[in-house]
Image: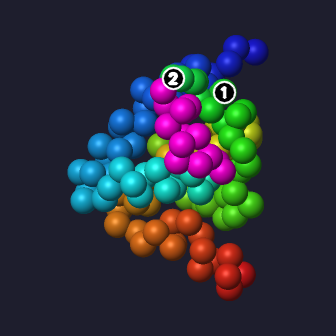
Amino acid sequence: MPKNRIFQMKFAGVYPHYVNKAERKNRTKKEVDQIICWLTGYTPAGLKKQIEQETDFETFFAKAPRMHPNAGLIKGVVCGVRVEEVEDPLMRKIRYLDKLIDELAKGKKMEKILREATAATG
């Protein structure tokens, strides 16, 4: 079965779109980076290195130090698809990231985006 086209897309090519989406809604690149680092376990320097190396999404997530244990708490719809129902593990990770960036652009507070309140109470 052929791989999904998005898996081969360069993360560095999509990253500016995440930042632009956030900045259009008065959020910051720093917040985008914080979300990406929270989800993947990359340090800011590690994230920068992945962008500079122009790794594809498949490699970006394969090299991620660790997916956050609360990533499974990310629920909702992105591009008409419920992220929690995405079967392919790599596509689910990509959709998790899309969902978090959407939440940032919609004005959600960072502690909600990073699932901190949910993890503490639940």
> How far apart are the two marked residues, 1 and 2, measured between alpha carbons?
10 Å
Q: Residue at x 63, y 77 (%)?
A: 118
The kind of secondary structure element at disc 1 is helix
Q: Quadrant of the C terminus?
A: bottom right
Where, by quadrant of the figure, is residue 65 drawn?
Answer: top right
Q: Is residue 77 visible?
A: no
Magenta span of residues? 40-52
Using the rendered view, name the quadrant where residue 57 is placed: top right
Residue that lies at the very extreme toward the top in this rendered image: 2
For residue 19, which quarter of the picture?
top left
- Residue 59's mark? 1
Please name the residue shown 49% across and 31% down the image.
51
Is residue 5 or residue 11 the one in the foreground? Answer: 11
Q: From the viewer's perspective, is 101 left or right of 43?
A: left
Q: Earlier in the sequence, mark 1 or mark 2?
A: 2
Instruction: Residue type at mark 2: give it.
Output: Glu
Tell me residue 43's x, y (percent). Answer: 59, 49
Instruction: Residue under label 2, please give it.
Output: 54
The secondary structure that dominates the magenta segment is helix
The image position of residue 1, as x and y in percent, is 75, 15
Element at label 2: loop
Mark 1 residue crowding within 10 angstroms, few (<14) / some (14–19) / many (20+): some
